[in-house]
Image (tube, rainbow, N blue to C red):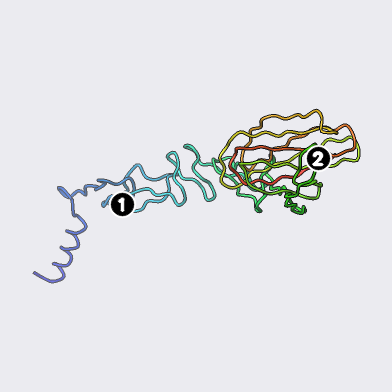
Amino acid sequence: MNVRIALCLGAWIALCAGCSDGECEPDCAGKDCGDDGCGGTCGPGCGELGTCVDGSCECEFEACGGTCCEDGQVCYGSSCCTPACDLIDCGDDGCGGDCGECPGAAGYCDADGFCQDLIAGLTRDPCEENHPICQTTAGCVLAEDEYVEGDFPGFRSFSFETQAAATVALELLFSGPFEEGAYEITRYGAGCADASGGNQRFTPGVPVVDSDAVDGSGEYLVEIYSETTAHYFLRISIE
């Protein structure tokens, strides 16, 4: 056989592999897309489902609910979702995740999605004195420019001073490994009378704010008892 004829015949046989009676039979077994072997394509094709790779549709980014998410989106439930973190520092991103953690040992995320630091600009008071007050002792006289740090479970007492009637807020933030337990704050009025207090419940990373009004100038005792296991930061503000 002439060599040229043999080469042409081989090429025709390769081209018409799978032909029957001179017609090409498409081969789409196991394919959703791509070449069918006869100059056509296998269906249903990819459409918005990404790019055809070896007969299968693959998303460039993340697949979700029968479609492909765009760059920067995540799959939330069965829909593509764009995290909303452009205008906030922390908190819920609207897609089942969060927008990041706040720096610092006493950093926390406020209700508006911005990072705050409970002890920024304050000086630590060890609060380990035996300051006499109310026929007992307190660990320290805590000022507004100071904070106390420690670990519960246990007991902590301190006092504060005011020059006139005011509202005094005690802010307590728990961090680190956390195991909830009973917790109580007891506040004494001027002259150690009219003790008030109550059990509190809290969430780690969210400050507990206990506010109360005092009638005038003086020194006031606060006692905190907690069975909660956690590291804590404590400060006061007087208005």
Residue at the spot of label 2: 133
- Asked whether the beta carbons under mark 2 and mark 1 sit within 8 Å of each other, the answer is no
Residue 168: image location, x then y, percent: 81, 37
Quadrant of the rendered structure where residue 163 is? Answer: top right
Q: In this view, does 125 lie above or below 197?
A: below
The foreground one among 135 and 234 is: 135
The mark total stands at 2
What amino acid is at disc 1?
Asp
The foreground one among 180 and 28 is: 180
What amino acid is at disc 2?
Ile
Quadrant of the rendered structure where residue 189 is? Answer: top right
Extreme residue toward the left, this view? 1
Q: How far apart are marks 2 and 1 (CA)?
A: 88 Å
Residue 214: image location, x then y, percent: 85, 33
Relative to 5, 129 lies left or right: right
Q: Residue at x 83, y 40 (%)?
A: 238
Residue 52: image location, x then y, percent: 37, 51
Q: Quadrant of the C terminus?
A: top right
Q: Is residue 18 above or below residue 5?
A: above
Q: Which residue is drawn at 13% across and 71% down?
A: 3
SS under mark 1: loop
SS under mark 2: strand
The foreground one among 40 and 83 is: 83
Relative to 157, 213 lies left or right: right
Residue at the spot of label 1: 35
